[in-house]
Image (tube, rainbow, N blue to C red):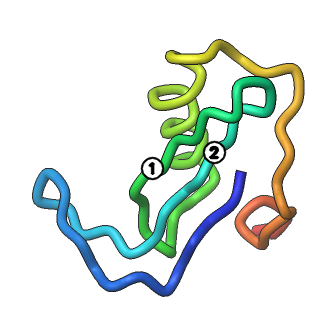
Amino acid sequence: MDFVTGLPPSARRKIAYNALLIVVYRFSKTVRYIPCSVDITVEEIGDILVEEVFARFSVPRSIVSDRGTVFIATY
C-alpha cells in the first residue's frame, strides 16, 4: 500500500482528487488504483480499504506500507 501524490486534480463523481492510493495484493499481484486526496485521514483510508479492498479480496493477515506520516502521526 502506497500513495502517489503530486497529480493534477481530477474529478470523479463531482469530487476532486489529486492522489492515488495503490494497493497490491501480494499473492495474485492484483493492483487497485483508488483515487483520493492528499489530505486524507486515517479514518477515510479505513473506509476506503473496507469498501474497495476487503470487500473484494477479504481481510488480509498483514498490511505492508511505507509508514507514511498519515499512519504514524500523533494528534
Q: Quick check: 38 left or right of 2? A: left
View extreme (front): residue: 28
Q: Are marks 1 and 2 in contact (CB under 8 Å)?
A: yes
User: Which sits earlier in the primary sequence, circle 1 or circle 2?
Assistant: 2
Which of the pair 10/30 is nearer the observer? Answer: 30
Q: Label 1, label 2: how many angstroms apart (C-alpha)? A: 8 Å
Which of the pair 70/36 is nearer the observer? Answer: 36
Label at residue 34: 1
Residue at the spot x=51%, y=36% of the render?
A: 47
Residue at the spot x=54%, y=78% of the render?
A: 5
Q: Which residue is mark 2?
A: 23
Quadrant of residue 53 within the rendered picture: top right
> The residue under label 2 is which amino acid type?
Val
Q: Quick check: 66 left or right of 41? A: right
View extreme (left): residue: 14
Q: Quick check: 14 left or right of 29? A: left
The crowding category of the residue bearing disc 2, from other C-alpha atoms within 10 Å (few below 14, some 14 to 19, many at least 20), is many
Residue at the spot x=78%, y=21% of the render?
A: 60
In the displayed structure, would residue 30 be above or below residue 54? below
Count of numbered marks: 2
Quarter of the image with the C terminus in it = bottom right
Question: Residue 13 appears at what percent x and percent y?
Answer: 14, 51
Quadrant of residue 68 within the rendered picture: bottom right
Which of the pair 28/58 is nearer the observer? Answer: 28
In the displayed structure, would residue 34 be above or below residue 52? below
The crowding category of the residue bearing disc 1, from other C-alpha atoms within 10 Å (few below 14, some 14 to 19, many at least 20), is some
Question: Residue 7 appears at what percent x and percent y?
Answer: 41, 82
Residue at the spot x=78%, y=59% of the render?
A: 71
Question: Residue 24 appears at what percent x and percent y?
Answer: 68, 41
> The residue under label 1 is which amino acid type?
Ile
Question: Residue 62 appears at what percent x and percent y?
Answer: 88, 30
Q: Regarding mark 1 in the picture, which secondary structure is present there?
A: strand
